Image: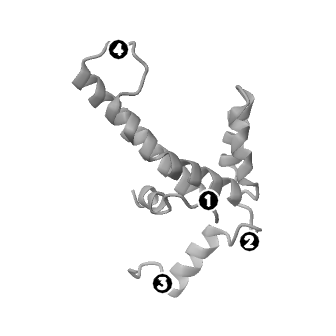
Amino acid sequence: MKWYFSALRKYAVFSGRARRKEYWYFNLFNSLIVLALIGVDHGITRTAAGNNALGLFSGLFVFATFLPTLGALVRRLHDTDRSGWYVFLNLIPLIGPLIVLVFTLEDSEQGRNQYGPNPKEVAADALADGTAYQSN
């Protein structure tokens, strides 16, 4: 859950880098919450099982988490040393989302890149000098 809240704290941050762990845990928990809210929506409105539309609660949640989701994707692309503009590949039917998926699955660019230091190395440095668990 810490990775989920870490991404939420960066609500509309499109700069910097995001590790695979942060990106994928954020998407996992977002998806689980949306599925639970779809169940609540269908339970409240008693709609037919064939209705694929988002209901009130799930729709509001997706709307509220759109910017954090987009920000996490842009930061993940930055971590692989790609511009955030690659997000627009998702608009190309079928092949675009697959290309973006491959980009998000790649390992981090080693060392510092134009978008900042490698988050893995920053975390390892913080653990080494004991500052990782200090509260702000």
Query: Image point 43% across, 46% down: which residue?
Result: 64
Amino acid at pointer 3: Thr
How far across and how far down the image is residue 110, in percent? 74, 66
Q: Earlier in the sequence, mark 2 or mark 3?
A: 2
Examine the rendered structure and indicate whether residue 35 appears above or below residue 74.
Answer: above
Looking at the rendered structure, which numbered label has been put on residue 49?
A: 4
Where on the picture, by quarter, is residue 99? top right
Q: CA distance from mark 3 to mark 1?
A: 25 Å
Q: CA distance from mark 2 to mark 3?
A: 20 Å
Quarter holding the C terminus? bottom left
Q: Which residue is mark 1?
A: 14
Q: Secondary structure at mark 1?
A: loop
Crowd band around label 4 with a 10 angstrom C-alpha radius: few (<14), some (14–19), many (20+) = few
Q: Which residue is mark 2?
A: 111
Q: Secondary structure at mark 4?
A: loop
Q: Which residue is mark 3?
A: 131
Q: Earlier in the sequence, mark 3 or mark 1?
A: 1
Q: Could you tell me if the residues under marks 4 and 2 are in contact, i.e. CB atoms within 8 Å?
A: no
Task: Work out whether residue 123 or residue 99 is closer to the camera in this orientation and state it.
Answer: 99
Q: CA distance from mark 4 to mark 1?
A: 37 Å
Left or right: 102 in relation to 124: right
Q: Could you tell me if the residues under marks 3 and 1 are in contact, i.e. CB atoms within 8 Å?
A: no
Amino acid at pointer 1: Phe
Instruction: State which mark lies toward you, 4 or 1.
Output: 1
Query: Image point 74% across, 46% down: which residue?
Result: 86
